[in-house]
Image (tube, rainbow, N blue to C red):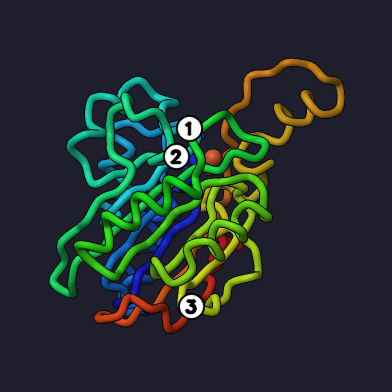
Amino acid sequence: MKILFIGDVFARPGRQALNLWLKDLISEHDIDFCIANGENAAHGKGITKQTADEIYASGVDFITLGNHAWGQKDTLSFIDDFPIVRPANMSKSLPGKGWCIVNTNKGDIGILNLQGRVFMDHVDNPFECATECLHEMRQYTNIIVVDFHAEATSEKIALALYIDGLCSCVIGTHTHVQTADERILPNGTAFISDAGMTGPIHSIIGMDIKCVMEKFVRSMPTRFEPAKGSFMLNAVVIDICDNSGVAKDIYRIFLKQS
Ligand SMILES: [Fe+2]
Ligand SMILES: [Fe+2]
């Protein structure tokens, strides 16, 4: 089972990158299932039905979210019905689901979304939540992908080691910068601190440079707008043993317009 996991799809340039490259990537790398983090799909914050539909149409099978899960009001209208998860350690009273089992012709795949707590808005303990969710999910399948949406590299590595052997991979998202630390952990879980961002290259993690510069240089409150122009696609491919769910390989993909 080969799974392609695409880092945070950011605004129109991110969606354009999927439309341009995804179908070829899926065939070139012999991908069975494609997951994308879509928390920034709609104008950089959140996801709408229209942007979710565009992402699925480009070849993505399943969408994960993060701290911007509720950035668009429209999300409430479809989150319970679409193949999409939001962090499981958010309030249980919120709509949507934190994990899901998807039936495919190569076997069932579990997808779990969690959010970190270091330098982020408050959520429940991701370590305890991961243990509880994985215990339930493993009754259905051994093939489990965890998207850990977190700021701190240390928290990401700690969570991955904590659940090493209980899932096929832990893929970090949220920082929008792809890290070069992909590896298979001792008990067979593949890991990368951050898959990166699929969106505008000439930007500050997706946003227009001038807007963000005003805030940093002059402390002037500004409305952030997504950057425009050339785009890139950041992703990882995880090769997983169909029966055991143990990861055999993980490698990075980084495409950019010249
Ligand atoms: Fe993001
Ligand atoms: Fe995020």
Of pointers 2 and 3, the one earlier in the residue sequence: 2
| Residue drawn at 57 percent across, 34 percent down | 226
Disc 2 element: loop
Residue 89 lies in quadrant: top left
Q: Position of residue 174 (x, y in %)?
A: 56, 46
Q: Decide: few, some or many residues near mark 2? Use Cα within 10 Å; few <14, some 14-19, many ≥20.
A: many
Q: Mark 2: which amino acid?
A: Glu
User: As drawn, which residue projects farthest toward the right?
Assistant: 217
Residue 77 lies in quadrant: top left
Disc 1 residue: CB within 8 Å of ligand 2: yes
**Which label sits on residue 220?**
none
Name the front one of labels 3 and 1. Answer: 3
Name the front one of labels 2 and 3. Answer: 3
Question: Which residue is under mark 1?
Answer: 68
Query: With 61 as the anchor, is 158 left or right in this view?
Result: right
| In this view, 111 is above or below 228 | below
Disc 2 residue: CB within 8 Å of ligand 1: yes
Disc 1 element: loop
Count of picture labels: 3
User: As drawn, which residue projects farthest toward the top?
Assistant: 221
| Residue drawn at 18 percent across, 71 percent down | 107
Contact (CB < 8 A) between labels 1 and 2?
A: yes
Q: Mark 3: which amino acid?
A: Asn
| Residue drawn at 54 percent across, 66 percent down | 255
Q: Position of residue 238 (x, y in %)?
A: 42, 73
Of pointers 3 and 1, the one earlier in the residue sequence: 1
Q: Mark 1: which amino acid?
A: His
**Which label sits on residue 187?**
3
Q: Decide: few, some or many residues near mark 3? Use Cα within 10 Å; few <14, some 14-19, many ≥20.
A: some
Marks 1/2: CA–CA distance: 5 Å
Question: Which residue is under mark 2?
Answer: 39
